Amino acid sequence: MFNRLFAVLLVAAVLNLSSCSASNPNLPIHSKNQEGPKVLVKSYKMSVGDQIQINVWKNAELSLSEPIRPDGKISMPLVGDVMAVGLTPEELAAEIEKKLVSYVKSPNVTVILTSLQGHAFLSRIRVTGSVVKNVSMPYYQGMTVLDAILEAGSVDLYADANDTKLHRKTTKGAASYDIRLKDIMEDGDMRTNIRLLPGDIITVPERNF
């Protein structure tokens, strides 16, 4: 029951589940320009390409909105370059405050993530539900559903493997595809062993006893 609830919550959080379903998907083309989610994520460690908004209270001229550069830094008025990659928004805000204290009395800085474009975050493949271990793994070219399931240690004893779903965010919204995982693993029927795209989520439900 816990695995099932966890799977539902994870998919809803990442895809917002305005999903449609298809049994034999025509694989959607992954859009490199697809807009990322606009959210404030306090625990997320920022990556190159993430768009951030920096607000300095009562000092609008110091506030800015820009992406994190390939060198991992952002440029702030007065203080120059500040390393952002690997920090949470709150940690970056604290670092900027330290640097501003020589120029601004009691600086109060807020950092908001407006677009999560970091490759490391968006491209990961996630497997959850009735598997040996819930995993989040890096995507690689040519990766399939079976590859991801094996990384999760295979299904557990309670899995309803032929009711597995692949959830994918497309340019037209969220989509859900039927995966007959038992047929793949036991019968060698690879018709639903779909090639994965960055950000895909696989959920394996429990059987109803």
Image: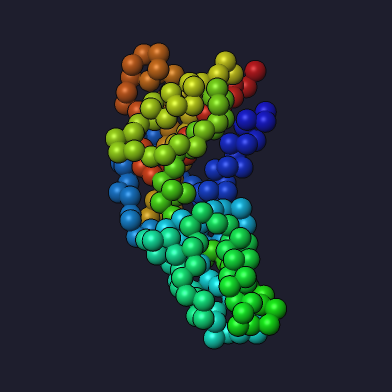
- Identified at 33% across, 50% down, the residue is 30
Q: Up-down: is 72 above or below 122?
A: below
Residue 132 location, quadrant = top right
Residue at left offset 54%, top offset 82%: 62
Vertical arrangement, residue 151 with respect to residue 14, above or below: above
Q: Is 196 left or right of 86, judged from the image as shown? A: left
Picture coordinates of residue 3 (x, y %)?
62, 30
Give the colour scheme of this rendering: rainbow
Q: Is residue 166 above or below residue 130?
A: below
Whole-percent x, y for residue 16 in the image: 54, 51
Rendered-image quadrant of the C terminus: top right
Residue at 55% x, 26% y is 133
Residue 41 or 20: which is nearer the viewer?
Answer: 41
Residue sitting farthest toward the front:
102
Identify the image quadrant of the N terminus: top right
Q: Residue, x 50% and y 80% (percent of image)?
A: 77
Residue 116 visible somewhere in the drawing: no
* Residue 106 shows in this picture: yes
Image position, residue 58 (x, y; %): 65, 85
- In this rendering, position of residue 95 left or right of residue 80: right
Whole-percent x, y for residue 207 in the image: 59, 21
In the picture, measured across the screen, residue 82 lies left or right of residue 25, that is: right
Q: Nearer the viewer, residue 206 or 118?
A: 118
Name the one closer to the observer, 91 or 18.
Answer: 91
